[in-house]
Amino acid sequence: MDNKDVIDDLNTLIETSKDGEYGFLNCAEHVRSASLRDVFAKRAADCREASAELQQMVRQQGGKPEDDGSTSGAMHRGWVAVKGTLTGYSDLAMLEECERGEDAALARYRKVAQKALPAGVMEVVQRQMTGVLRNHDQIRLLRDQARNAADKG
């Protein structure tokens, strides 16, 4: 795999991580539950750490790392704000939006992980992808719990 392609793929994952960080922080601002706020803040910190690690890898590959999220991530955050306004920023709505964001992140990581990356890069991508999957599953579980509570309430 060409070094430029490796750098491009790493930069895509940096954007993905930045999108996650901003998305989780945005949702943390709007949830009512203190425990959800803590979960979202922790997930944002995890995304920030993943991004920093990827940025260092891009530098090691001789490239210039991305330092911002993607346009689609910005649009998603805008949608979170619009949907939040329409739904009164319910915890369930924020969990649903976070799950959508994690679905997109997982898809991007899976796409990059299928490529012929250098061994050290592949190791980091796979480890981070495991973290994204863990985040996704946690958010989905919390979303399911919120849905069940809403159905009973």
Image (spheres, rainbow, N blue to C red):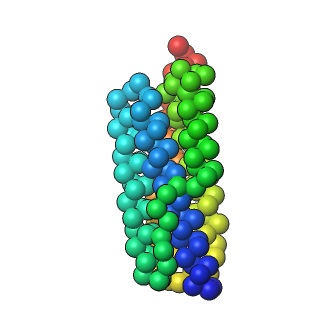
State which quarter of the image contains the N terminus: bottom right
Quarter of the view holding residue 31 = top left
Q: Position of residue 80 (x, y in %)?
A: 57, 35
Q: Residue at x 53, y 20 (%)?
A: 88
- The foreground one among 128 and 50 is 50
Does 33 sit above or below residue 56? above
Q: Position of residue 28 (x, y in %)?
A: 42, 36
**Residue most extreme to the top:** 153
Q: Position of residue 152 (x, y in %)?
A: 54, 16
Residue 90 in view here? yes
Q: Residue at x 57, y 65 (%)?
A: 12
- The foreground one among 120 and 78 is 78
Does 33 sit above or below residue 63? above
**Residue most extreme to the bottom:** 2
Q: Position of residue 116 (x, y in %)?
A: 62, 81
- Figure disc tally: 0
Q: Residue at x 50, y 44 (%)?
A: 23
Q: Is residue 116 left or right of residue 64?
A: right
